[in-house]
Image (cartoon, rainbow, N blue to C red):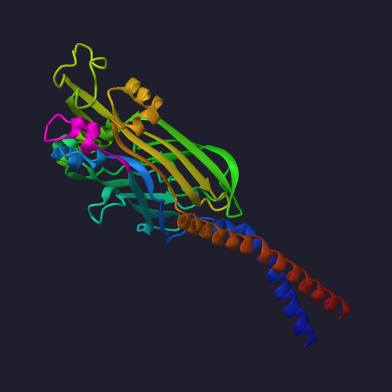
Amino acid sequence: MKRILTHTALVVGVALLVLAFALPAVVLPAGKVIPKDIDTYVATAPAQGRLLDSAAMAAGKAVGDNARRPECRGAAPDKPVSCFIWHDIELKNQQHLIAQEPTSKKKVTLEAGSSLVRTDLPEPRNLVTATVDRTTLDRRTAMPVDEPVSSLDITAPGAPGGGGDRVEEETPQFTRTGLQFRFPFGTQKKAYPYFDRQVLRTRNIDFVDKEKINGETVYRFEQVIHPTEQFPQVEQMLSSDGDLSDADRQTLASLKLTFPAKVWGLTADDVDGWDGQGEGPDVEMSRYYTVHRTLHVHPKTGVIVKEENETWLFYARDADDADRIVADKDGELDNPQRTALYYPGAYDDATVEAQMSEAKSATRWMNTVGQYVPWGAGIIGILLAGYAVVLIRRS
């Protein structure tokens, strides 16, 4: 009986010591991957924004308090664009992120359904834009795979001059680079490539500082994309399969608009050779995009616990004109003349709490597997193995 007890203590002790080394060395690294069963919902708190109502513009009907302005009254066809821009309209963004097939030990396919809505209208009239974003990531690095498997399905307002009907666009599949939905486990204090689907480009997002959210240390990353013309990149993407569909042409039409100078709110000082009489010559404007993005990332897990995006889309004649508008940002937003969309969105409190809860849950698992169980197993293993050795020597 004593011999059985001795051998049992020795075997169990050695097994616990092996477990103590295996958990942090093998099991923990293998578990630091994006889960296969992701199913999360995030939303921004309602925020005051600006919005060009393309349907109202197509109908020639001024929106909100703009209808009281002399130049916006009646059925005149030459109302300024500013007549159709909502001031201080409440907007909200929501996103459902879910894992899809194909998913494997090394890769996971994520599909994010996002929608920007007005809070003053019922469904489905409240929809401003909707996007279904699909990509496949390396589960360990959180980076997209180097294959043309990413896609975007977009529902957005059409060109105001083309009737204002919604456009449903499906981009050709493309190879994506840069992070988007998560950061890697063990996020470092450095710049990371980050994909922006408005301009379909990857640019660095920079580490700025450490902060505390709900008692947890997070890393703050910031990215500023200066005014960028959307048309060239979108055209290149849509024509990458060698053909432009009707939906493609409608999408591109909304990115470049041509109206008389007066409709754009221009004066004789803004247009060479025009005396300010009548509607003035036709002026083409292109849509520009700028954003100030702030992400708060839980460094141990890579979970984005808080996100803020100050998004601004507006029309300008060229890059210099776009820079001028941005330089007078407060003036343009106080009295919008060219703004298509301005939305300063930030995760609401419920989303921050849910994202932090996910990060804490993953952290508890890592602490359990990487510290608590190995230490406990190691101590018990040493005691049992030592006890067995003592009994063997005595015998």
Is residue 311 magenta-colored? no
Q: Residue furthest bottom?
A: 1
Relative to 213, is 256 above or below? above
Q: Nearer the viewer, residue 107 or 267?
A: 267
Percent across and percent down for residue 117 are 30, 50
Percent across and percent down for residue 288 are 32, 31
- Quadrant containing the C terminus is bottom right
Percent across and percent down for residue 39 are 41, 60
- Asked which quadrant contains residue 12, the reply is bottom right
Residue at 54% x, 53% y is 301
Q: Nearer the viewer, residue 169 or 51?
A: 51
Q: Nearer the viewer, residue 120 or 168?
A: 120
Give left or right: position of 162 versus 13: left
Is residue 70 magenta-colored? yes
Relative to 17, is 218 above or below? above
- Quadrant containing the N terminus is bottom right
- Asked which quadrant contains residue 53, the reply is top left
Residue at 12% x, 32% y is 76
Residue at 16% x, 39% y is 61
Give left or right: position of 329 versus 236: right
Q: Residue furthest right?
A: 394
Q: Is residue 170 visible?
A: yes
Percent across and percent down for residue 380 are 74, 71
Q: How many marks?
A: 0
Q: Nearer the viewer, residue 376 or 216?
A: 216
Relative to 281, is 249 above or below? below
Q: Is residue 243 visible?
A: no
Give left or right: position of 279 versus 296: left
* Magenta segment boundaries in residue numbering: 66-88
- Asked which quadrant contains residue 101, the reply is bottom left
